[in-house]
Amino acid sequence: MHSQGPDLSNVVSLTIALSERVAETRRLGHLVAVDEIEAIGNVASFLRQNLDEWPPQLSRAICDVITSSPRGRSRSLLLVEYIQSGAFDQQQSGKHTMPFVMDLYRIVLGRDAEDDALRHWSAQLNAGKISRRQLLGTVISSEEFRASLN
C-alpha cells in the first residue's frame, strides 16, 4: 500500500466497515441494498486509483455482491471496477477453460452459459485462438452486458 494520510486511512476503515456489513447481510441470506452496492463501487473506484491493493474485505464483499445480486446497473458498474482492479484475473487464474467460461458468464452476465457457447469458447481458449482477456472483453462489449448498464 502507498503511505496513507489520515483521510485515506479513514476511507480504508470505512471501507472495511461497509464490507463487513455486506458480509453480515449475505450471512443472513438477504440481498445487499442498491445504495450499498453503489457505495462499494464508489469506494472501489477511489481505492483502485489511490492504493496498490484493496483491503481483502473489499474483494470478498465485491465477490459476494457480484455473485448474489440481480443484474442491474449498480452490479454491472461494480463488476467493471472489479475487473479493472485485476481481482477477477487473480480469482480466475488457475481455472481450466470450461469452469472459467462458466464463471465468466455467471459473473459478468449473471446467468449460465448456453451449452453451445460453453463448448465454443472453451474450444477457442484451448486452441489458443483467443485469450481469457480477449474473451472477457468480448463478453463485456456484448449487447447483453451493455444493456445492464442502462
Image (spheres, helix red, strand yellow):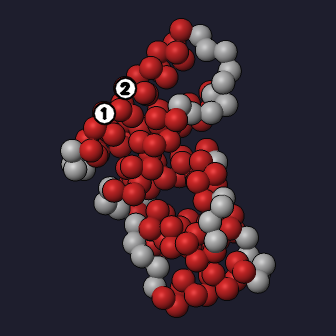
Image coordinates of residue 59 in percent, x first then y, are 50, 41
In terms of depth relative to the viewer, which is nearer, 89 or 149? 89
Image coordinates of residue 51 in percent, x first then y, are 63, 28
33 relative to 18 in the view: left or right: left
Task: Give above or below for 110 relative to 121.
Answer: above
Graded by Cα atoms within 10 Å as few (under 14), some (14 to 19) or many (20 or more), the crowding at tag 2 reads some
**Alpha carbon distance from label 1 to label 2:** 6 Å
Helix, strand or loop under label 1: helix
Residue found 49% across the figure and 22% down from its top: 12
Image coordinates of residue 47 in percent, x first then y, are 56, 31
> Which quarter shows the C terminus?
bottom left
Task: Give above or below for 20 relative to 34.
Answer: above
Task: Give above or below for 10 relative to 96.
Answer: above
Decide if residue 103 is in sight here: yes
Which kind of residue does numbered mark 2 sit on?
Answer: Ala
Which kind of residue does numbered mark 1 sit on?
Answer: Arg
Question: For the view shown, which residue lies furthest in the top direction?
Answer: 6
**Displayed quadrant of residue 69:** bottom left
Image coordinates of residue 1 in percent, x first then y, are 66, 24
Helix, strand or loop under label 2: helix
26 relative to 111 in the view: left or right: left
**Displayed quadrant of residue 135:** bottom right
116 relative to 3 in the view: left or right: left
Residue found 67% across the figure and 86% down from its top: 123
Task: Give above or below for 107 relative to 75.
Answer: below
Residue found 61% across the figure and 44% down from its top: 85
Decide if residue 139 is in sight here: no
The answer to the question of whether label 1 and label 2 lie on touching residues, with beta carbons closer than 8 A, is yes
Residue pointed to by mark 1:
21
Residue found 64% across the figure and 71% down from its top: 96
Residue pointed to by mark 2:
17
72 relative to 54 in the view: left or right: left
